[in-house]
Every structure is written in C-alpha cells, then in structure tokens.
Image (spheres, rainbow, N blue to C red):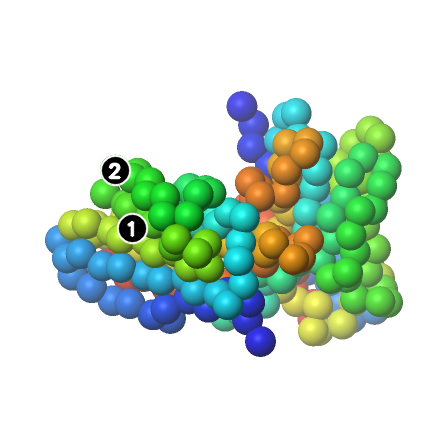
Amino acid sequence: NAGVMQNPRHLVRRRGQEARLRCSPMKGHSHVYWYRQLPEEGLKFMVYLQKENIIDESGMPKERFSAEFPKEGPSILRIQQVVRGDSAAYFCASSPQGTRETQYFGPGTRLLVL
Amino acid sequence: TQLLEQSPQFLSIQEGENLTVYCNSSSVFSSLQWYRQEPGEGPVLLVTVVTGGEVKKLKRLTFQFGDARKDSSLHITAAQPGDTGLYLCAGVPNYGQNFVFGPGTRLSVLP
C-alpha cells in the first residue's frame, strides 16, 4: 500500500523562477490538502482540493500561488516568481472521501530559494 | 493566536522515564489527531480520538480526549530514544472547516 508520494523531495530555485511541487495521494483517496511549514513553526493549511475542484483555498497567498488536482495525474502546487520567503517545507496530505479528520501526510518537499 | 496550544514546547528526558504532553483549546473539536514528525519527514498519524473522555492506548502511548472535547493529552510510559520527535495535535474545530495544527512538543529522549 503506497502512501502519499511527493516529489521532488528537495528543490532549489533562484528568485524569480517557478517551483512546481507534485503530490500523489494514497490509493483510494480523493481529497488532497497542501500545508506549509516554516522553520521552527507549525503546519499551516494552504488549500484543499478534490479531483478537478478547489474546495477551500483560504490559506493560499493571494498572488503567485496556485494549486490543481486534475482528473488524471498528481496534484500540483505551483509557485511563480519565487522569493526567499517562500523557502519552507511543503507537505501534501490525503484523506478518503467524506472526511477531513484523518489525513495522511507525504514526506514533503523542501524548497530553498536562493 | 493559536487555536490549539501545546505544552511543554520542549521536553528532554532520560530513557525509561514517563512523560505527559498536553494539547489545549478554547474551542470544541469533533475529534483530535496526534501525529509524530521526525526531522526531514512528514507527520505520521498516531491516533484519532473522537468521544469526550475517550482513552486510547498504542503500546506505551496513552491518549486521552477531554470530556468537553477541548483538550487532549499524550502519556508515554518508559520512554525510549526512538520516541524522540515532534508531537503534533490537530483537528477541525466544530465551527470551522480547516484542519488546524498545534505548534508541537519537541521531545528528546536521551539514552
């Protein structure tokens, strides 16, 4: 039973470049969530998606950040024109249909912006 | 302002000792989850508590959900170095929609 997969595990970008983070949920899970964890801080909710739908994006910065979960393929978190403050660990979680309470996390992508 | 508070923030103990960490809120939660996160990894789900007053045991770990469903505790008996990590509580408050995390308790068990 494969868990939540994220890639890449580490990503280095220069200021102004784009970062694309991918997440494949657990088999049978149709809900995906993205979180950001800054050094020495807790996990902060960013966005909640189901296939082809954004359910809740209240935690997403208004600019430069976008997320999608297409019918086929992984969920993508896209950060355009990255800045140093975007450096963080980005975690994806998934849950079965109908519940937000039990989420299983991937190993995360550590983004470093130079 | 944190919706979920955790204490202590840091805890360093010797192998074999017992410990309790706490998760508190002024809000009611339909359930609370406990996770452990190790450096460089994602949080791993340990348990979900749902019913007020519920107690769940996972080997040497005992989880309790407060009667009012506003707080929870995690007790570890005879801690081992493998218990070292960041312990996070999380849940969806009754009035809200988003999954919120506490700031965590960073536990270090020394051999």
Q: Position of residue B29 (x, y in %)?
A: 53, 54
Q: Residues within 10 Å of mark 1 (few under 14, many from 20)?
A: some
SS category of the residue bearing label 2: loop
Q: CA distance from mark 1 to mark 2?
A: 12 Å
The three-letter code of the residue at mark 2 reads: Lys
Q: Give the residue type that dot 1 points to.
A: Asp
Query: To which chain does the residue with label 1 belong?
Result: B
Residue at numbered disc 1: B83
State the SS at label 1. Answer: helix
Q: Give the residue at x 55% y 40%.
A: A102
Q: Position of residue A42 (x, y in %)?
A: 54, 65
Residue B82 screen position, x and y as percent? 27, 48
Asked if marks 1 and 2 fall on the same chain, the answer is yes
Give the label on residue B59, or none.
Answer: 2
Q: Is residue A9 visible?
A: no
Residue at point 27%, 53% (across, down): B75
From the image, which quarter does the C terminus of chain B lie in? bottom left
Counting residues from the start of the chain, the first of labels 1 and 2 encountered is 2
Residue shown at the point (22%, 59%) measured from the top left: B19
Question: Going by the image, does B6 lie left or right of B3?
Answer: left
| Quarter where residue A66 is shown | bottom right
Q: Nearer the viewer, residue B42 or B46?
A: B46
- Picture layout, residue A107 above or below residue A86: above
